[in-house]
Amino acid sequence: MANYPFPSKRAPVYADVPAEQWSNWRWQLSNRINTVEEFEKVIRLSESERKALSAPNLFRVDITPYFISLIDPDDPADPIRKQVVPTDREMVPFTAMMEDSLAEDRHSPVPGLVHRYPDRVLMLITTQCASYCRYCTRSRIVGDPSATFSRAEFEMQLDYLKRTPQVRDVLLSGGDPLVLAPKILEEILSRLREIPHIEVLRIGSRVPVFMPMRITDELTDMLQKYHPLWLNIHVNHSNEITTELAEACDRLTRAGIPLGNQSVLLAGVNDNIHVQRQLVQDLVRIRVRPYYLYQCDLVEGAGHFRTPVGKGVEILEALRGHTSGFAVPQYIIDAPGGGGKIPVSPNYLLSMSDHKVILRNFEGYITTYEEPIDYVPADAARFKLEKRPEPGQSGISGLLEGEQMFIKPEGFDEVHDRQGIQHRLKDAKKWVPLGIGEGEKGEEGKKGA
């Protein structure tokens, strides 16, 4: 076991809790704090926090004893405190705020299943978490026991997956899958593994961060039966990285489970280039690869956490070249309205011609790269690839591949028809591009030519 230089803390109120209880994840869940009286035993609440905790219909509050112990009680701006202790700023609406900002429910063929991308799905299997992030994307259902998914809905999810062969990757989330009873979690994993076309299973969890004692040998022994299985955790600040988290990650990686980190850019928490550099370097030190840095979603209650997009680009500018390449996450805006994840980064490609590109590096060094003039691409037909993108989702790649020549806004043709009559010069064959598309569409193009 490595000698990790990360702190291990316990708030004074828990000093007399026996080590056997403290290290028991069920005890941690059973003793979460959520009332003004319980909070006051650990930290001195501000008026804003007290007001929020007393407000009706507030998004659920629960914090494990382990995680609240990481808060500096003398620092009202503590980065962990801001993530999990509510303030009255949550109750302030903001422009573009939405209940379901990512339109997940629109992409949900059956309850709890989100099929946004061609070959993978998000499977929501619980609405419960070990603790609750104040910027939660799914606060519309997370934390609400009445919104949890039933056995019948679980069977509907499995049925959809069985009859949708293009799905090869299933991400389990919620809520947090690792708060489920071990037998239930194993049943879900085993049922998914019975579906032949599902190749990869993934789990998104903040349990290792909120409650690292949940990562037992019993759990890792079970998880590794369902490889290939990947797990992404969620750390936003280096103060969350402790000896206990490092040991939990060590147990997971020794079980052959690759670990990534998904963090959220949060005002007053990690919107600083030095904080972010320290975070990614501490993560790779415990063998967790930084994966995504998300722009905060337009979700109710999260307005005060939002930063300009330029702040995220600035952070990437300060990471690229200044730390190891594999420690630089992708900066992602999850498109409002359901467009999915869009990567945003500084511009390194400055210009190009028909045979040369102009590039710059992180220092501002500008160089040229001479392109080949005799390049011939490989013939895709030689590879006999069986898997093709789902029709309608190939996007820009489909244009480059020659599947189609246009992507038009909705109603484009109707607008430009100008409500005119069908006359002798209007022949649809005129604007079918020759050789673009496959099958009947391609043949139609040839006829039109």
Image: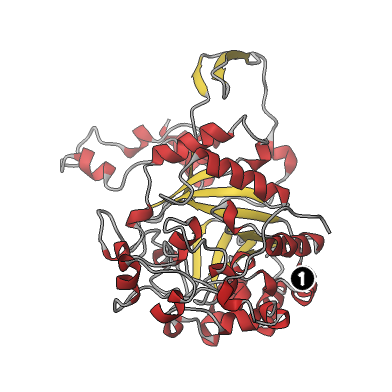
Residue 44 screen position, x and y as percent: 41, 69
Residue 235 screen position, x and y as percent: 57, 56
Residues 93 and 371: in front is 93
Residues 368 and 25: in front is 25
Q: Does 151 sit left or right of 374 as displayed? A: left
Indicate the quadrant containing the N terminus: top left, top right, bottom left or bottom right: bottom right
Q: Does 91 sit left or right of 180 as displayed? A: left
Q: Is residue 356 above or below residue 243?
A: above
Residue 411 screen position, x and y as percent: 26, 47
The mark tally for this picture is: 1
Circle 1 SS class: helix
Name the residue rendered at 58%, 41% in the picture. 277
Residue 407 screen position, x and y as percent: 39, 40
Estimate how packed mark 1 is, as few (under 14), some (14 to 19) or many (20 or more) residues with alpha carbons within 10 Å.
Answer: some
Name the residue rendered at 49%, 46% in the picture. 332
Q: Amino acid at mark 1?
A: Thr
Residues 402 and 323: in front is 323
Indicate the quadrant containing the C terminus: top left, top right, bottom left or bottom right: top left
Q: Does the image show residue 185?
A: yes
Quadrant in the rendering for residue 382: top right
- Rendered image coloring scheme: secondary structure
Name the residue rendered at 39%, 65% in the picture. 106
Name the residue rendered at 64%, 83% in the picture. 26
Quadrant in the rendering for residue 197: bottom right
Q: Does the image show residue 404?
A: no
Quadrant in the rendering for residue 14: bottom right
Q: Is residue 157 above or below residue 171?
A: below
Q: Is residue 448 above or below residue 213?
A: above
Q: Which residue is mark 1?
A: 220
